[in-house]
Image (cartoon, rainbow, N blue to C red):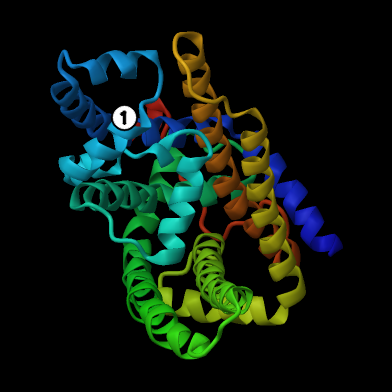
């Protein structure tokens, strides 16, 4: 427990010492949403036109119109539902993961591009947190380039594992096993409890896979591993030998995310117009930044724990690339 807490504190410190990374990934996230927001905005404008619904929308959120619009719009417009307001957006995303709800092709395409960019940045981010010192843009993007193709190979394994969990295991648990468990059950609480147990099992398997892949990335960066199969095997070995600390740290990181959601639920404004709209926009951006901060804390704290147990703070096997000074460049 003490090592997990120390790693969490160290991870938070490392993230806070590199605010440029948080600002960069926040900007990336905003940029990824702008095209979809522009398309959706034009679709909404065409649908409202000069109708009475437009006047009602100007006075506040018109839930009846939103439901009608999402039902007839299709594609990206189908995502414009009352659940996008306030905390409902976060809970709706979690519900989509838990129930394996299919998403529009446009959302899947945007998510794929976003994930690919994160895959490129992951090596530079973990390398910066592992070194625990500024690496400048040359060192950061050099690490991004070095590990991108390695992480691309790891992503193939991730796709297979998550494809099995989401595409095969989830339907088996909830479409085949659950009906058998509740067959003949007359008490609603019993059926609900059975479904909750299946959600817990499914969530633990997803979390376990995420934990292994996180440590595979950490080991690949810190130890400069080229083989992703070796990184995965050694990640499993590290988690097995340090199960208490690794699992405790993962739970603490997850609780940090829950605290962020609780804080947002406490301050998230309701619907309205004028200043209330801008307050909602600002608090939504704060939540986005906080969620990204938690994601970075996951990586930095796991890196800190790995170094704490097997090396020392700031240890990275790969030498930091040094951009040649002007005389050296001329000599080259």
- Where's residue 253, x and y in %? 67, 54
Depth order, front residue of 120/27: 27
Location of the N terminus by quadrant is bottom right
SS for callout 1: helix
- The picture quadrant where one finds residue 176 is bottom left
Vertical order, 266 against 308 (above or below): above
- Where's residue 326, x and y in %? 38, 25
- The picture quadrant where one finds residue 269 is top right
- The picture quadrant where one finds residue 291 is top right
Left or right, 124 with reference to 168: right
Residue at the image point whose x is 47% and y is 22% from the top: 281
Residue at the image point whose x is 51% and y is 75% from the top: 202
Depth order, front residue of 133/330: 133
**Residue 332 appearing in the image:** no
The residue tagged 1 is 330
Location of the C terminus by quadrant is top left
Report the residue that reaches farthest toward the front: 186
Left or right, 101 with reference to 123: left
Q: How many marks?
A: 1
- Where's residue 106, x and y in %? 20, 47
Left or right, 1 with reference to 313: right
Vertical order, 157 against 70 (above or below): below
């Amino acid at each position: 427990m003490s090592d997990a807490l120390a790693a969490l504190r160290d991870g938070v410190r490392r993230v806070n010492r590199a605010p440029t990374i948080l600002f960069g990934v926040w900007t990336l996230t905003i940029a990824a949403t702008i095209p979809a927001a522009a398309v959706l905005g034009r679709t909404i404008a065409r649908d409202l036109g000069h109708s009475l619904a437009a006047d009602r929308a100007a006075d506040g959120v018109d839930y009846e119109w939103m439901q009608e619009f999402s039902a007839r719009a299709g594609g990206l417009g189908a995502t414009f539902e009352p659940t996008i307001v306030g905390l409902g957006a976060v809970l709706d995303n979690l519900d989509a993961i838990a129930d394996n709800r299919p998403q529009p092709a446009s959302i899947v395409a945007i998510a794929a591009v976003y994930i690919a960019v994160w895959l490129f940045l992951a090596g530079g981010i973990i390398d910066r947190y592992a070194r625990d010192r500024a690496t400048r843009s040359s060192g950061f993007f050099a690490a991004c380039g070095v590990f991108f193709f390695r992480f691309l190979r790891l992503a193939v394994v991730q796709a297979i594992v998550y494809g099995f969990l989401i595409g095969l295991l989830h339907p088996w648990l909830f479409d085949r096993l659950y009906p058998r468990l509740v067959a003949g059950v007359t008490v609603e609480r019993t059926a609900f409890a059975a479904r909750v147990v299946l959600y817990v099992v499914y969530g633990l398997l997803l979390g376990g896979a995420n934990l292994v892949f996180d440590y595979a990335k950490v080991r690949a960066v810190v130890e400069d591993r080229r083989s992703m199969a070796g990184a995965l095997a050694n990640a499993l070995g590290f988690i097995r030998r340090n199960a208490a600390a690794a699992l405790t740290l993962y739970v603490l990181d997850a609780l940090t995310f829950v605290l962020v959601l609780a804080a947002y639920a406490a301050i998230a404004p309701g619907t309205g117009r004028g200043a209330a709209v801008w307050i909602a926009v600002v608090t939504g951006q704060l939540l986005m930044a906080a969620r990204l901060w938690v994601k970075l804390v996951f990586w930095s704290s796991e890196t800190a724990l790995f170094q704490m147990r097997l090396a020392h703070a700031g240890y990275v096997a790969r030498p930091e690339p040094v951009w040649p000074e002007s005389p050296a460049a001329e000599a080259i």
